Image (cartoon, grey):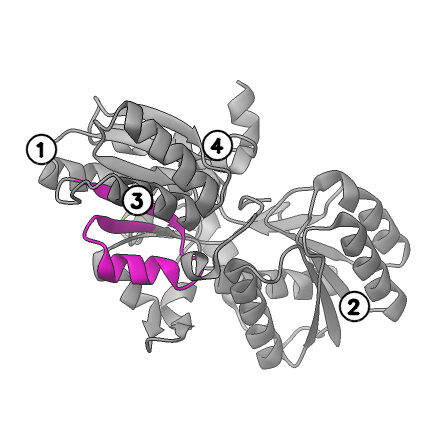
Amino acid sequence: MGKPVPMNFDKETINMNWSKTLLFIPVAAVALAATFAAPAQARNMPRKIGYVTNYATHEWYQNVIKGMKAHGKDLGIEVEVQDANLDIAKQVAAAEDFIAKGVDVLIITPVNEEGVVPLLRKAKAANIPVVLEGNPVKGMTTMVAICDYDTGYFSGIEAGKYARKKLGGTAKVMNVGLPLLSATVLRSKGFMDGIRTVIPGATMVHDLDGGGNPDRALEVSSAALAKNADINIIYGINDSSSLGGLQAWKAAGKSQDNLLTVGTGGEGLAFINAIEKEPSYRIEAAMFPEKEGYTAIDAAVKLFNQEKVPQHIVSPTAPMNGDDWKKYYSYDGTTRTIKWDAVNALTPPAKCMKTAADLKK
């Protein structure tokens, strides 16, 4: 999937503006975005969409579901959700149940690629179109997901600007990554490529496997810092990774005065709390889970109407600097609420700068 599979997440922990950069996106990209943003009232609406998520207790997916249900309500579509809880057998059973009920469209966040392939065949036999969220599967029609490399790249540019201004022009990075997944490898590679456009001498001091969860990220970051603490940037491929790295830094008794922490995801409340409370947590590569859910519903409507869609429908991301998050979310101390006008105004690229295929070159 586009995001790492969450494991052992602590709920409290888990809880760039690119507009200038994207001014020169080709007209085709703008047209594509306009197609998905345009009101769908003129189309036939599916009555019911079934969504099988892989891990509904994670805040990312809770917010994806919120986006789906909010947009579905606006369009008069019932959206029913079933949770696989990281169990492919449960995912298969849930999808088969939706097929038996005769839902108009299926949306699936795969637990794993291989297990979903037979579901695509079964849905096709039942004439039920399928939208995948986050992760590609062989034989798919379309997938809604971010561009992982781009997400890292543009946050890297922002990190480079910050380091040039406030860290003496040096960039020594501890990457709290996840080498198991191509998506997260792309984020880390994009980050380093982006930061080097501003600071050519930027180095990756530590390249860690944080497992995508806070406990593992804390463990490996603590061990790395014990060996070599000469870093000034912590980059995490998701919020749990960046926060685990920062926790290790703080546990070692180190000051955040000359440190920059960069998170990825904007999954829930954790990044907002970190930006508000942690001096070094200044940049977040936001992935807008609510918008991903919104876009998945639009894709489902298009498939229901037998309209052509690209194989990868790109959901927008944006690097947030400091209080930039307030452009896209309001927060009352308990709940965050997405500002749809601002997020829907973001224009995703027509295609990703690099994909998993580029990692093999």
User: What secondary structure is marked by label 3?
Assistant: helix
Sequence-wise, the earlier of marks 4 and 2 is 2
Mark 2 and mark 1: Cα distance apart in space: 57 Å
Q: Is residue 236 left or right of residue 16?
A: right
Can residue 35 be seen by looking at this rendering? no
How far apart marks 2 and 3 lie (CA) works out to: 45 Å
Q: Which residue is mark 3?
A: 246
Could you tell me which residue is drawn at 30 percent across and 44 percent down? 246
Q: Which residue is mark 1?
A: 168
Q: CA distance from mark 1 to mark 3?
A: 20 Å
> How far across and down, in percent of the image, does residue 238 sit?
43, 46
Question: Counting residues from the N terminus, which is met first, the one under dot 2 or under dot 3?
Answer: 2
Residue 159, given in percent of the width and then of the height, sits at 24, 40
Helix, strand or loop under label 1: loop
Residue 315: image location, x then y, percent = 50, 54
The N terminus: image quadrant: top right
Question: Which disc is residue 104 wearing?
Answer: 2
Span shown in magenta: 259-284
Label 4: which residue? 185
Amino acid at the residue labelled 3: Leu
